[in-house]
Image (spheres, rainbow, N blue to C red):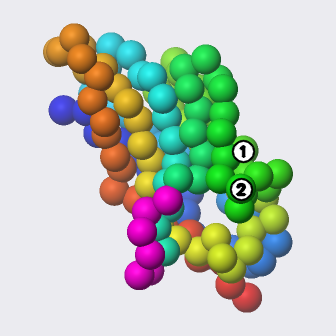
């Protein structure tokens, strides 16, 4: 019943910016950690940025200083602001949330379907 839907991907010029959004829907009791991962063609899925319920953040070294993760808890939404984009940032970006559904007393991992980001001239 719980699902994550990403949006905001697209084509952007090197040095440009994009803002990704991920909204969780369903009967949600609470959301713990939220994160963004990315997967380039032929590569494994890697962590980009994470944010805890207490708003502590962690970033991959490759995006530190350029990307900012944030969350809007009342809207069950997590964002990824990406600045100074480089061709190496080209990938499908996936949203991750650790969610406790209203129907169960345990947390589960949920993934979005992904949104594609292409950085090219």
In the picture, measured across the screen, residue 34 lies left or right of residue 50, that is: left
Quarter holding the N terminus is top left
CA–CA distance in space, label 2 to label 1: 13 Å
Q: Identify the residue at horizontal 39%, vertical 16% (top origin).
A: 30
Q: Is residue 70 above or below residue 87?
A: above
- Quadrant location of residue 108? top left
In the picture, measured across the screen, residue 30 lies left or right of residue 11, that is: left
Crowd band around label 1 with a 10 angstrom C-alpha radius: few (<14), some (14–19), many (20+): many
Magenta segment, prevailing SS (helix, strand or loop): loop
x and y percentages locating residue 27 in the rendered image: 26, 20
Query: Which of the pair 84/24 is nearer the observer?
Result: 84
Q: Is residue 53 above or below residue 33?
A: above
In the image, the segment drawn in magenta is 41-46
Q: Is residue 63 above or below residue 25?
A: below
Q: Identify the residue at horizontal 82%, vertical 51% (top origin).
A: 65
Q: Earlier in the sequence, mark 2 or mark 1?
A: 2
Can the viewer see residue 67?
A: yes
Looking at this rendering, what residue extends furthest in the front direction?
61
Which residue is tagged 1? 68
Q: Secondary structure at mark 1?
A: strand
x and y percentages locating residue 8 in the rendered image: 56, 57
Q: Identify the residue at horizontal 67%, vertical 46% (top origin).
A: 59
Question: Is 45 colored magenta in this rendering?
Answer: yes
Quarter holding the C terminus is bottom right
Query: Which of the pair 57/75 is nearer the observer?
Result: 57
- Quadrant location of residue 11? bottom right
Which residue is tagged 2? 61
Q: Identify the residue at horizontal 72%, vertical 44% (top origin).
A: 68
């Amino acid at each position: 019943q719980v699902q994550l839907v990403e949006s905001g991907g697209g084509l952007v010029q090197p040095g440009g910016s994009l803002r990704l959004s991920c909204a969780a829907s369903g009967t949600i009791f609470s959301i713990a950690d939220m994160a963004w991962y990315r997967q380039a063609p032929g590569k494994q899925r890697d962590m980009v940025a994470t944010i805890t319920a207490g708003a502590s953040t962690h970033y991959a070294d490759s995006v530190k200083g350029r990307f900012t993760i944030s969350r809007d808890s009342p809207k069950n939404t997590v964002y990824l602001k990406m600045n100074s984009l480089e061709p190496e940032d080209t990938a499908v970006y996936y949203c991750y949330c650790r969610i406790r559904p209203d129907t169960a007393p345990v947390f589960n991992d949920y993934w979005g379907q992904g949104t594609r980001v292409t950085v090219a001239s």
